[in-house]
């Protein structure tokens, strides 16, 4: 997946007397200092970066490559230089969201609930951004994979090595995106196989209110004490999202369906219900999205809603169309004609965001809205068409 942020990479730099003065819309000015200093062979303290106002970039602006280009050119030309990437450069030379494959298997008891659960994931690790020899996932295992909040007596999570064939980087919610897709698509398959309601089945998978005992690193004492994995909070957002969507209380027409998913990421609990309408041409439209979020203490409710409304639109683009391919080492996509973004006629018509009142410590809101969106969308597609989606983007599945 490409970030395809509205503003492509851009920077201004001036090299003078062994020092660099730079202006850039960057998420990581420290990385600008490190990279420019390394490229030019100067001290990090001799690089000053002014962070300009920046629009959303979903992680792309954490990378400082365009600033390094401007600094090198300024040194060569002896003048300040402004670098603006074209859209084609932006998409073809992105730090892409990595590809992933997941394998899911469960043993089912007489009541239709899992007695054993196996999940296996393979994807290029983000650590390969820093070390080309890195092949095994590390911290990403904790992004929605080995912290499964389900009440299952026998649970095993595995991962394996995978090469990175293109340069990869952070994209909104990182590994949570594909982990949530696999887990909650599978959970919905189990619900349907047991002929049970998806919401009720999900609540039973989560189990009774409790604190899940996770393994923590030595530097995660604050997270262990102040942000334990509390299934009561996860259950609450599931119940609220289902209630506000009218789940089980309204009759849906032909080609319509509801789907649900819930995920905890960045210490925030989110449940999303998506309604889809699949027309006679197989195109998916989204009449409504209902999201419930428990992010602890909320300071600015309007900003929280903005993030989750934006996640619904961003998630629509990624789930319906998002795909980067390559031929002979060259990225095929280069602009919005071949890397599609959801336009107004495909974006959700209505997005409802309900913030759960909480006195827990504040948690993240910029990224947690994305992981449950794709599985909720694809579960809704199954409810509408009877066709299960196991591969994204959804445009690859004939409906």
Image: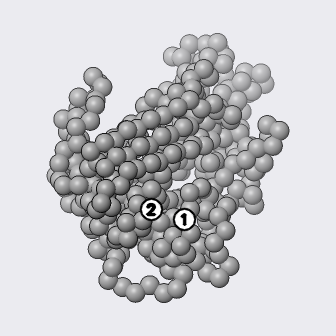
Disc 1 to disc 2: CB gap under 8 Å: yes
- Image quadrant where residue 11 sits: top right
Is residue 54 shown left or right of residue 85? left
Reply above or below: 370 against 67.
Answer: below
Residue beneath disc 1: 388
Front one among 222 and 215: 215
Q: Is residue 238 above or below residue 71?
A: below
Q: Nearer the viewer, residue 202 or 312?
A: 202
The residue lying at 52 percent from left, 27 percent from top is: 136
- Residue 294, percent from left and from top: 27, 56
Look at the image and tell me in which quarter the C terminus lies. Answer: bottom right
Which residue sits at x=69%, y=44%?
90
Which residue is at 42% across, 65% downward?
A: 193
Residue 256 lies left or right of residue 18; in this view the side is left
Q: What label sits on residue 224 in the rendered view?
A: none
Looking at the picture, how far across and down is residue 263, in whole percent?
Answer: 36, 53
Instruction: Give the SS element for disc 1.
Output: loop
| Residue where numbered disc 2 is placed | 189
Q: Up-down: is 387 above or below 266?
A: below
Tell me which corner region of the image, top left, top right, bottom left or bottom right, holds residue 93: top right
* Residue 106 visible in the displayed image: yes
């Amino acid at each position: 997946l490409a970030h395809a942020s509205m503003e492509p990479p851009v920077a201004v730099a001036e090299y003078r007397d062994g020092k660099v003065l730079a202006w850039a819309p960057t998420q990581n000015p420290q990385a600008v200092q490190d990279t420019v200093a390394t490229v030019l062979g100067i001290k990090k303290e001799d690089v000053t970066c002014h962070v300009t106002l920046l629009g959303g970039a979903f992680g792309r602006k954490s990378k400082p490559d365009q600033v390094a280009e401007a600094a090198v050119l300024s040194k060569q030309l002896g003048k300040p230089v402004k670098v603006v990437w074209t859209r084609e450069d932006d998409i073809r030379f992105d730090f892409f969201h990595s590809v992933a494959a997941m394998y899911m298997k469960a043993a089912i008891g007489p009541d239709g609930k899992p007695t054993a659960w196996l999940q296996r994931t393979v994807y290029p690790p983000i650590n390969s951004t820093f070390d080309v020899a890195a092949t095994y996932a590390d911290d990403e295992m904790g992004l929605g994979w080995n912290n499964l909040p389900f009440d299952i007596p026998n649970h095993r999570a595995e991962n394996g090595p995978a090469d990175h064939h293109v340069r990869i980087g952070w994209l909104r919610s990182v590994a949570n995106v594909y982990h949530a897709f696999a887990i909650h698509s599978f959970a919905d398959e189990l619900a349907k196989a047991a002929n049970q309601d998806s919401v009720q089945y999900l609540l039973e998978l989560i189990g009774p209110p409790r604190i899940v005992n996770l393994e923590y690193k030595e530097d995660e004492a604050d997270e262990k004490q102040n942000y334990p994995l509390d299934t009561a909070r996860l259950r609450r957002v599931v119940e609220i999202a289902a209630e506000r969507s009218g789940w089980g209380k309204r009759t849906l027409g032909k080609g319509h369906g509801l789907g649900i998913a819930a995920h905890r990421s960045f210490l925030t609990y989110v449940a999303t219900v998506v309604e889809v309408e699949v027309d006679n041409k197989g195109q998916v439209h989204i009449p409504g999205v209902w999201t419930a979020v428990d992010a602890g203490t909320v300071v600015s409710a309007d900003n929280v809603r903005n993030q989750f409304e934006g996640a619904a639109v961003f998630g629509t683009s990624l789930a319906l169309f998002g795909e980067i391919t390559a031929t002979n080492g060259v990225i095929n996509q280069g602009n919005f004609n071949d890397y599609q973004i959801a336009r107004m006629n495909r974006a959700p018509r209505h997005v409802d965001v309900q913030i759960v009142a909480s006195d827990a410590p504040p948690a993240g809101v910029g990224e947690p809205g994305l992981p449950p969106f794709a599985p909720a969308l694809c579960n809704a597609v199954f409810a509408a068409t009877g066709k299960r989606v196991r591969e994204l983007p959804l445009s690859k599945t004939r409906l």
